[in-house]
Amino acid sequence: MLDGVRHKIKYRLSKEYRREVDALEEIKRTFTQLPRCQPYVIVANPDYGEGEYQATITMPAIDLLAWVNAKLESGSPLYTDKVFLPLLRDWLRDAEESGSEQSRFPAIAYEVIEREIKDWIEKGLTTVYCPSCASEIQGFHKAEKDRWNAGNSLYFWTDNWVCPAGHLLYRRNEWMHINRLSHRIDTRNW
């Protein structure tokens, strides 16, 4: 009861809290309006608009559900994970069990898996479809292009993945900044 009273008072007094609660309700409403999940989920596609993937990347819904459950059990500290993972679990749990149909991953929750897709591809957990070859790709060539650095602490390169026929599947500009100490600390006597 006390939580209900606290919520009501906070909701009336705090504009930021109202915005957060309303946003969460909108996200939940979006998930309730999603069509039923199919056995396979498209996790990346040029249509998502991030510009990195030029191929269609699919993953079995059951494998994606296992990843979501493991992520929930690990107690992920990210706020977006705490919001989206339970909703994704419910959506994936109700997935069709047979067939070859595909569902599009909910765009509203894309940031939750965005940082994982590249690892899933490298581990072979996904299917990569090259639109130029019109076929599934079993192996691809990874190359770093345009590698250069600014001094000894800032490095830039472009990751390119191409199919055996030479069609671009993935491209991302990467960079790494190394913060170096300007002096050495003598730790021998610690």
Image (tube, rainbow, N blue to C red):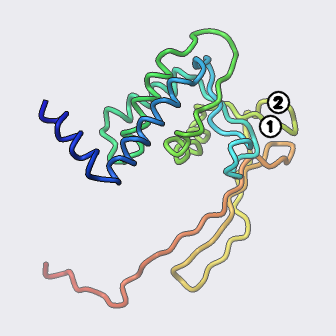
Q: Is residue 112 left or right of residue 45?
A: left
Relative height, residue 91 to residue 4 (above, below): above
Q: Against 190, is 31 above or below?
A: above
Q: 13 or 163: nearer the eye?
A: 13
Along the horizontal axis of the image, is 14 left or right of 148?
left
Q: Which residue is mark 2?
A: 135
Give the answer, above or below, for where 159 lies relative to 109. below
| Residue 125, picture quadrant | top right
Q: Amino acid at mark 1?
A: Cys
Label 2 residue SS: strand
Residue 73 screen position, x and y as percent: 31, 32
- The amino acid marked with disc number 2 is Ser
x 87%, y 43%: residue: 165
Q: Which residue is mark 1?
A: 130
Task: Assess whether mark 2 and mark 1 are in contact (beta carbons under 8 angstroms).
Answer: yes
Is residue 190 left or right of 38 when viewed as pictured? left
- Which residue is located at x 44 percent, y 36 percent? 84
Q: Name the spot of residue 82 as percent of width and height, x first.
A: 36, 39
